[in-house]
Image (tube, rainbow, N blue to C red):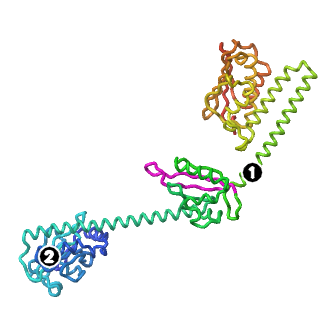
Amino acid sequence: MAADPSTPPVSPDEPQRLAVLGDHDFSRLADNGALRRITDFAAALCETPIALVSLVEEAAQRFVARTGLAAESTPRRVSFCAHAIADDALMVVPDAAADPRFAENDLVTGEPHIRFYAGTPVKSREGLRLGTLCVIDRTPRKGLTPLQQQGLETLAEQVGLILDANRTIGERQEADAQATRVLSESDDRFKGLADAVPQMVWATPADGKPDYYNQRWYDYTGLKPGDSDGDAWSLVLHPDDRERAVATWQKAVDSGEPYEIEYRLRRADGAYRWALGNGLPQRGADGRVVRWYGTCTDIHEQRMALEEREIISQELSHRIKNIFAVVIGLIGVAARERPQLAGAADELRDRIGALGRAHDYVRPHSPKSRPSEQPGSLRGLFKALFAPYDSETAPRFVVMGSDVQVDDRSATPLALFFHELATNAIKYGALSRDGGQVVITVIDDPQKVQIDWREQGGPAVSAPGKMEGFGSRLVELSVVRQLGGVVEREWAPDGLRINAEIPLTAMRR
């Protein structure tokens, strides 16, 4: 059976063509002045009463711009344009009443009584034929002049560009809407997470003026949303801490460095409690700070416990010092009753004194009582032990290299070991002469600490025959047995050299 010539053909790319048509917002195209000017000009150029921009959809053709016609659409089955998009070329129908494809067409036998039709395809940027720019007359015509054909095709290209621009705007708006939805969902997740944590969470723009707090902040402070935005956040701080906190925060904002501070924060019941404030910058691709995120954590109990521990520690330290003093006093009494023990008693008093200094250095400290050196560091322990022997004008001890943390467990054997070395250096070695010096070099790696003791500027030394004295046994007891280390000695012409290697795990817990 022969195909009905009046039935519009369907191209193989029909699914793709309809998909592209679906990308357009026809409500915006309905009022597009540029398309209307094109149909007006096309009608004038081709001397026809009607000109249309027709988009052929699945079941209908939609007139997104029209001149001389009131209808906004017609069924696809009667569409002349559905035939025109089957080919790239301009389709001309001189007399529709004499054309078997259209003779019985409702648009020919009824309004608008089409007799002449000329339409050229309008293409998308992918090359898909979406519809036509067409001109229509109610009387038959032979065709269009070459100039009219060229003009109609040029105008059709302009229509395609306008449609693509409309489509791009729609895609951009959809992308913007999608981005807005993603940001909104991300913001909701962040707020949900922030409200679930026990800390007070805050955020600020790059200028450092807070614009977000989680619910925990409002519950804790009793403030309402907006009360602590901008610079008002500092008003909930204790008056004595406010200036310091604001200055610290401004320094972090100006430098981009992490923010950390302890201050007293007013709770909803009016009580001031210690809190720890932390903040970290979020940086953009160019490295600039775009936002700050931070927390406030109530540390009041921990702070009070620390202060109580400091009081107890100071009392305990005082009692231990009294014990050292009593022991030293007993040694003095024994030495006076037995003069022959005076030399040994002096050495024993010195060693106990060294242990007392080591104890005072490694005991727990508060920020107020902490030594100026790193708390519990080897370099600080050296300073405490060697202070009685050193000189401000000509330092007798030079410490070089790394600084390693030590704890109360390792401080005692280290104090005994280095006090013994210092005592011997003063009696027999480099420190027994003016200008003599001890250079201590510390090298650490992930497994061990190497401490090199080198004396210089003292008298010539020579290796003893046997090393069975108390000092040698003390070295064996402190470094080898208690710390699990190794000690090597070298009696060089310019002074004694000792190298001690101690496992890093023995230096601190």
In the picture, measured across the screen, residue 277 lies left or right of residue 128, that is right
| Quadrant where the image shows the C terminus | top right
Q: Quadrant of residue 368?
A: top right
Give the magenta-colored segment's residue range.
Answer: 273-298
Residue located beneath label 2 in the image: 43
Q: Residue furthest left?
A: 142
Q: Report if residue 217 lies within the magenta region.
A: no
As measured in the structure, the alpha-carbon distance from the residue carrying label 1 to the one carrying label 2 is 92 Å
Image location (x, y in percent) of residue 190: 53, 61
Q: Is residue 28 above or below residue 436?
A: below
Query: What residue sits 19% from the left and 74% below the top?
Result: 9
Q: Quadrant of residue 199?
A: bottom right
Q: Which mark is residue 305?
A: 1
Q: Which mark is residue 368?
A: none
Q: Could you classify mark 2 by the number of other residues whose Cα lies within 10 Å: few (under 14), some (14-19), or many (20 or more)? A: many
Q: Residue furthest right?
A: 337
Q: Is residue 27 above or below residue 217?
A: below
Q: Quadrant of residue 166?
A: bottom left
